[in-house]
Image (spheres, rainbow, N blue to C red):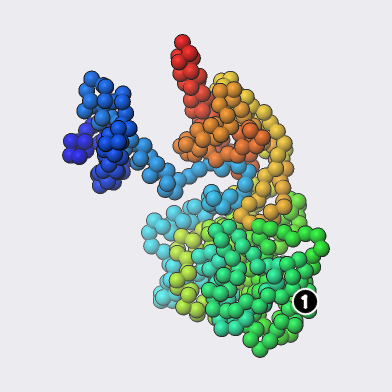
Amino acid sequence: MDLLLRRPGLQGLIAEAGRGTVRDRLREVLDDLRSELKNGSGDADSASAPDVAEALSLEIERRLAGRLARRHQAGIQRVINATGVVLHTNLGRAPLSQAALEAINRAAGGYCNLEYDLETGRRGRRGTGLAAMLKELLKCEAAAVVNNCAAAVLITLNTLAEGGEVIISRGELIEIGGSFRIPDVIAKSGARIREVGTTNRTRLSDYEKAITENTRIILRAHPSNYRIVGFTERPALEALARLARERNLPLFEDLGSGCLVNLTSRGIPDEPTVEDSLAAGVSVLAFSGDKLLGGPQAGIILGEAPVIEQIKSNPLMRALRVDKLTFAALEATINSYARDRATRELPALAALHASRETIERRARNFIRRAERLGDALEWRLVDGDSVIGGGCAPEAKLPTKLISLTSAQAGATQLEEQLRRHSPPIIARITDDRLTFDLRTVTQAEEKELLGAISHLTAWLRQDEAARQATRS
């Protein structure tokens, strides 16, 4: 072990990963190698080399480097999203704006007034500035922020319905990604679920009949990543809010996506906005920060001041609260809306509003540059669709132009794997046995890196072809 750790070939790995990490991974490599040699499955070429010890040492270095590389890839790293899925949950959902990144840097690089009132010089309350911005922008009475929308649903139901019943339509007992199920969250909140209506049809009278002395809240849940179509019925939100007021009950809407911009012009007419819900008269609503809002992960709770104050006083608030970086990013994001610059400054909204003509122009220019790298790849421009993702408007399709590539030397799966292993990794999709890129989710600044990845892919194809020719010779 000591001799191996002193080898020149390991010094770079030790400098990058640390001696302790390299030592631990080295033990694993040695254990694997001992097992192979014991079972007779070791590398025969190494055993027949002139210098067996040196050959084994080189093999150990190779395996160690591979193991450390895989460990690095398991950590968070930037990728280029060429899938055309704007809010790709697996890729981190909404990218942050430049203003949000700068705000995070300012907050992270030193101290800030997170819980300090600069006016009085005394301890302040976390999130006061953001709450004021949300109240002014959305004309709501009060606001609170927790670490995601699931947490917002949990703390709201625990605050307002613990020990009582929550009325919800059977058609809204949803499950979204990561096995988040509304019935499970209601149970964890300490409340009991009271289902009304049927999967496809729930009327206002169903809610009215279900109200008893045990009812604490009426819950309306956004269907998120699915739609029920055909023979359906659902009461208008305004009618449900009126019934809740008449029965002196809070109406809570889990809005999910947090859309502040009407997307009808983008061919997405059924995505409700936060302002619409507030105008309908809900007592409290919750939505995500990293979906259509275009900000960091957070659960934003808006509504009537007495209700929000109750939620803020819940002991769970401390367990679910967000840090200074999230507040900084959210304030910058909301400020983009306040200045009417959201569709230009927020990457997710900018991607949604990009026209097919703009994407086609960029794609044609990209193909021209890529073709100069050689003839190992065949390029085509084809019609396709982008999607929103993130559980938002699952039926919505945004017309786009896809860059399609194939190779006579390698299949689409092999090409995809090579690009995925590039640095930074390129995440593309395979359509009809062709690898495709959608520039809707690739920034113009990232196009240069994408071309660099194509250059490496072309070089790999040339090397692979040269190796095959040498083998045939």
**Residue 439 location (% of width, % of height):** 62, 39
Residue plotted at (48% across, 18% down): 468
For this orientation, the residue located farthest to the left is: 2
**Residue 465 location (% of width, % of height):** 50, 19
Front-most of 347 and 216?
216
Total numbered labels: 1
Instruction: Locate residue 108 relative to residue 1 in the image: left or right.
Output: right
Vertical comparison of 320 with 32: above or below = below
Q: Which residue is mark 1?
A: 204
Judged from the image, the secondary structure of the residue bearing numbered disc 1 is: helix
Vertical comparison of 413 with 257: above or below = above
Front-most of 311 and 153?
153
Residue 439 showing in the rendered view = no
Please tell me in which quadrant of the rendered image residue 372 appears.
top right
Front-most of 151 and 352?
151
For this orientation, the residue located farthest to the bottom is: 213
Residue plotted at (60% across, 68% down): 182
For this orientation, the residue located farthest to the top is: 473
**Residue 229 location (% of width, % of height):** 77, 59
Vertical comparison of 64 with 118: above or below = above
Residue 184 showing in the rendered view = yes
Please tell me in which quadrant of the rendered image residue 287 appears.
bottom right
**Residue 368 location (% of width, % of height):** 63, 25
Instruction: Locate residue 219 relative to residue 128 in the image: left or right.
Output: right
Q: Residues within 10 Å of mark 1 (few under 14, many from 20)?
A: some
Residue plotted at (53% across, 64% down): 148
Q: Please identify the quadrant where the N terminus is shown.
A: top left
Front-most of 36 and 311?
36
Please tell me in which quadrant of the rendered image residue 67 appears.
top left
Circle 1: residue type: Leu
